Amino acid sequence: MSVLAYHMVDTRFDWGITRVTPKQFRRQIEFALNRGFTFQTISEYLSYENDHSKHIAITFDDGYKSIYDYAFKILKQFGIKATLFVIPGFVGQRNTWDVNIGWLKFDHLGWHDIKEMHDAGWEIGSHSMSHRDLTRLDNRELDYELDASKMLLERRLNSPVHVISYPFGNANRRVCEASAKHGYQAGVVMGKKITHVPEKFAVPRIGLYLLDSLKIFEQKIYLKNMRAYRTLQRFIDLCSDGTVVVKQGLKTKK
């Protein structure tokens, strides 16, 4: 059982490694299908009561337009649904919430694309309103990021939003409790552990990256060598905190 986390599926160059190419993505999906895996949305995955060993939930953070241009079309060919975590405050805009090394910017999905994906059976979740580290916000700002993003998505899609992906994978007990207060039923993270919260609000995921070979993909979906991969994931998460410091400074909230 595994929950996979993707960001960009794109042909464009980026200085980071948080993308995979469309060809790479297709090969991964075909590989899993050929080995008898089935795919679910994150809510379906979390509600599945039987053995998860041959089930995969695919999630996409940030809501880049490349997900519609490539991943959505590839998955549609195989009848696969996934979960897309959207930043409503950046719908139809460029990713200026990021550091944009080398001044490279990428487009986010527009509402029409998101609606089409939702109508095709994709689950749409929140990735906060503006992609800020929620643990560094005061209570008023935190409530806004959680509530406004959920309400806007629900209004535009006329459908409930149940799950949140915490930006940068950063959450703590305060963030998780606030998420539950605002009506979320679950939350997903990356490599960082969150203690003293219900498991459903700290669902771990496995990141897929440009440098991952098909062999590495195989190990990740079969949960092999996970101690090494989770250590690497925590290092990648730590690197992403550089964006947090640049955009939000060093101030933190307990």
Image (spheres, helix red, strand yellow):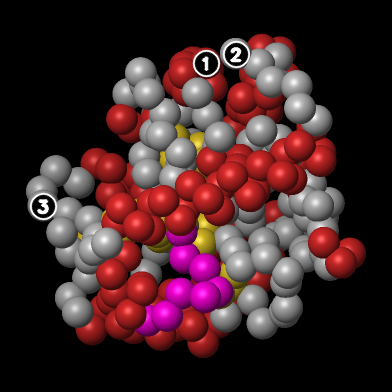
Q: Which residue is mark 1?
A: 174
Check residue 210 for magenta coloring.
Answer: yes
Give whichever of discs 2 and 1 has the lower sequence position. Answer: 1
Local packing at callout 1 (Cα closer than 10 Å; few below 14, some 14-19, many 20+) is: some
Comparing labels 3 and 1, the label whose residue is closer to the camera: 1
Task: Using the image, determine if residue 231 lies above or below residue 245.
Answer: below
Residue 221 at x, y = what percent? Answer: 28, 66
The alpha-carbon separation of the residues under discs 3 and 1 comes to 32 Å
Q: Residue furthest right?
A: 103
Amino acid type, label 2 = Lys
Identify the residue at horizontal 22%, vertical 70% (top origin): 37
Give whichever of discs 3 and 1 has the lower sequence position. Answer: 3
Mark carried by residue 51: 3
Amino acid type, label 1 = Arg
Comparing labels 2 and 3, the label whose residue is closer to the camera: 2
The alpha-carbon separation of the residues under discs 2 and 3 comes to 37 Å
From the viewer's perspective, tell me whether residue 50 is left or right of residue 251.
left
